[in-house]
Structures are given as C-alpha cells and as structure tokens.
Image (cartoon, rainbow, N blue to C red):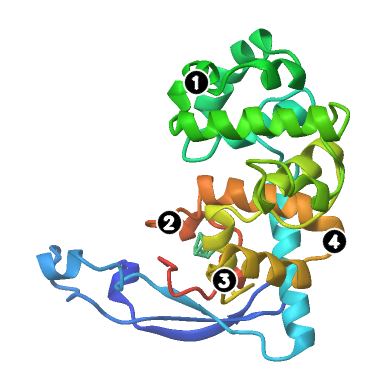
Amino acid sequence: MSRRVSDIDWDFTVKSENGIIVKVNARTERSAKSNQRSAEQKKPLTHLPRAYVKRPKTAAERKERVAEILRRLDRMYPKATCALHHHNAWELLVATILSAQCTDKRVNEVTPGLFAKYPTPADFAAVRPEVLANDIRSTGFFNNKSKSITGAAKRIVQDFGGQVPRTIEEMLTIPGAARKTANVVLGTAYGIASGVVVDTHVQRIARRLDLTKNTDPAKIEKDLMKVIPRDKWILFSHQIILHGRAICAARSPRCGECALAGVCYSKDRTV
Ligand code: SF4
C-alpha cells in the first residue's frame, strides 16, 4: 500500500546543492487505517514535512548565505525593475509620491493623463494644490499628495533648474521625498545607488531572511547597505518587492513555491 507524506515518520538531514544542511522531519499525524483526517488535524499545517534550515554561525557563512540569496533572486527575478510607468526622473518622482497607500496599477492609470495636462515641473509648480488634488483624487490622500507634488515642483524649478537632483542629500530637501522615494528615483531613473529602497515588502522580507532584526525602515536600510554589495542595492530592492507581491506575502507566504526556501529559516515559513 502506498503511504502518503502525512503517514510517515521522517527525521533526517539532506545536503542541498549549495552545501547547506537541511533537516527534514515529520511526525505521524493520522492513522494509516483512517482515510479521513479529523477536523483538529485539518487546522494546522504542522502535519506537512517542515524543512529546517541551519542558521549561519560564522561571518564567512553569513556572507556566503547572502551571496546565495542574491544568486537565487537573480534567477527568480533577473529583470526586476520599478512597476511605475515614467519617462524621466520627474515623472517617476510624481508617480512615487502618488503610490503611497495606492497600487502601482492605479497610479499608472492616472499618470498618463496627468503628464499630458502638466508636461513639466514648471506646469506642476504653477497649478494650485486644490486643483491638482482633483486630478489625483483616485489615488487617495490626494490633498497631502497634491501639496507634496506642487511643493516638489516649486523646489525643483527654483533651486535645481527644473531638473530632479542627483544626490540623496539634495533629494531629501524636496517636499514629499523621504529616503524611500529618493532611493527609488535616484536608483531607477539615474542608476545611482544611493541606498536600498525599504518599503513594506522589503521591511517584512529582510526580517524573514534574517538580513536585519530591526523594524525601523531607516535602521533596516542601514543593515541592508552593510550586507548587500553596493552594485546590487538597486536590483535587490526591486527583486524583493516583486518577491513580496508574488510569493512572500505578509499572510500565508507561498514557501512551497519559493526558491529561497533552502536558505530561509523564518518562523513565518509555511513548509
Ligand atoms: S521561504 Fe517563505 S518566508 Fe522564506 S522567503 Fe520564501 S516565501 Fe518568504
């Protein structure tokens, strides 16, 4: 008689292709005689075999693990980039401000008409915030976003000759541009690695992958800048954001489909 996974007592270790020892164990959760699981057994997923991934202990092991994470991300998301449509740094800055508490899809629906109506930063600087708020109403929080965008346009026209600046220090003087927005614009529009974009996905997954123990975005960014090579900062952010949307969701991450499972020992793992 064939035996199903949930019928078998397992307790062994296997060596994965990258040399990491993976311990697999599972306990019998139901009788072989019974074809029906009880309601109690159906609740938790603990009857599935749960892989145990050994934590790195030395600095060399930690470094190799990060390198392995990056290799796997490159295989999963080789061409990851920003999902916000734009033609230049200014349009990306506006789109990023609009994306707060709003989906990229909705922002991409709003921006073509918006940039047709106001083609340059000078046009945004000239419009009254309450008028602009009406144009961006569907993105939510439109009054605050409108003030940020018109304020950013004025600063860029008055102090930067109508061009979005190219340093993080200058970017942080622009209304509506905190570190996350500044890193998005500098990295994606100019290819300048000024830092690591830390949005809600990066916050969650960096912790799950044990790349940080912090919860504050500024501290998480500092931790990531230490462990991720600078030439990977831009791509890494895009990859992790895609991974958060596709697989490593806040609730019920799809670990069974995750190529990082062999290097992930998060307590949030579902398999
Ligand atoms: S194994 Fe699960 S928790 Fe870990 S990164 Fe993958 S989806 Fe996220």
Query: Which residue shows up at 78% across the image and 40% down it?
Result: 188
Q: Which is nearer the eye, 257 or 86? A: 86
List the residue tagged with mark 3.
264
Alpha carbons under labels 4 and 3: distance apart? 22 Å
Q: Which is nearer the eye, 58 or 200? A: 200
List the residue tagged with mark 2.
250
The local secondary structure at tag 3 comes to loop
Alpha carbons under labels 1 and 4: distance apart? 41 Å
Q: Is 142 above or below relative to 110? A: below
List the residue tagged with mark 1.
130
Query: Which residue shows up at 77% across the image and 78% down it?
Result: 63
Q: Is 120 above or below relative to 72? A: above
Q: Quadrant of the C terminus?
A: bottom left
- Which callout, 2 or 4, points at the residue further toward the start of the chain? 4
| Beta carbon of the mark 3 residue lies under 8 A of ligand 1 | yes
Instruction: In the displayed orientation, state which residue is furthest to the bottom.
Output: 58
The local secondary structure at tag 1 comes to helix
Label 2 neighbour load within 10 Å: few <14, some 14-19, many 20+: few
- Which callout, 1 or 2, points at the residue further toward the start of the chain? 1
Q: Which is nearer the eye, 262 or 6? A: 262
The kind of residue tagged 2 is: Ala
